Image (cartoon, helix red, strand yellow):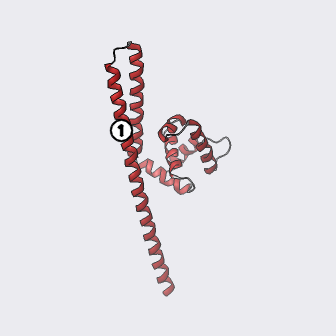
Amino acid sequence: MNALSEQRATSAVDFEKEIAALRTRIASQDMELTRVSTAIAEKTNALRNLLDQIYALEIDTTIKRSMTDSCLSLIETETIEKRLNIELTESDSTFLSKLQKKHPNLNQRELRISLLVKLNYDTREIARSLGISTRGMESIRYRMHKKLGLGKHQSIKTYLSELSIMF
């Protein structure tokens, strides 16, 4: 009886430690999310100011249109990135949770990349979102391919899509 009582007490202490660690992790991720959201908002405001300045210029309309289209495209990209950082759907959260359980060796960055790959973002868009080069992103995907235990000709995107359907 004493052994069972001690085992329960140890389990309860371990459980409380795990809860504390998860709370710390959540607080850290909340801080990171706030930092990223603020940075995106600042970039978007700077792009909007630049767009206003371009509209005020008296230059060739073709050049002006090209410049404004580029700014609008960047603003749209920033808006999408902000949405991705904030608005995870319940199915996205479930997918990430199941993926992490199946592949505990994936770090937070790789989990985020996995979600973006599953959502059909290409390597260039993901690299831009992470603030790294396309080549750096390709290296990360190569390492992820190994961590996921995929065969040489198996696609990460196909694997993640099939994995999400199984949930």
Tell me if residue 105 comes above or below residue 127 in the rendering. Answer: below
Tell me if residue 42 comes above or below residue 72 in the rendering. Answer: below
Image point (53%, 53%), residue name: 107
Image point (38%, 45%), residue name: 86
- Total numbered labels: 1
Question: In the rendering, at what x and y percent does residue 93 appear?
Answer: 44, 50
Tell me if residue 142 can be seen. Answer: yes
Q: Is residue 62 left or right of residue 104?
A: left
Which secondary structure lies at badge 1? helix
Image point (50%, 35%), residue name: 125
Q: Is residue 61 left or right of residue 123?
A: left
Identity of the residue furthest to the top in this view: 60
Tell me if residue 1 can be seen. Answer: no
When asked about the image quadrant of residue 49, the answer is top left
Query: What kind of residue is marked 1?
Result: Glu
Identity of the residue furthest to the right in this view: 152
Question: In the rendering, at what x and y percent does residue 100 appear?
Answer: 52, 54
Tell me if residue 49 comes above or below residue 20 in the rendering. Answer: above
Q: Is residue 116 left or right of residue 72?
A: right
Question: In the rendering, at what x and y percent does residue 5 appear?
Answer: 46, 83
Question: In the rendering, at what x and y percent does residue 2 appear?
Answer: 49, 87
Identity of the residue furthest to the bottom in this view: 1
Q: Determine crowd level at label 1: few under 14, some 14-19, many 20+ residues with C-alpha closer than 10 A.
A: few
Residue nearer the viewer, 128 or 92? 128
Residue nearer the viewer, 33 or 93? 33
Q: Where is mark 1, residue-wise?
A: 42
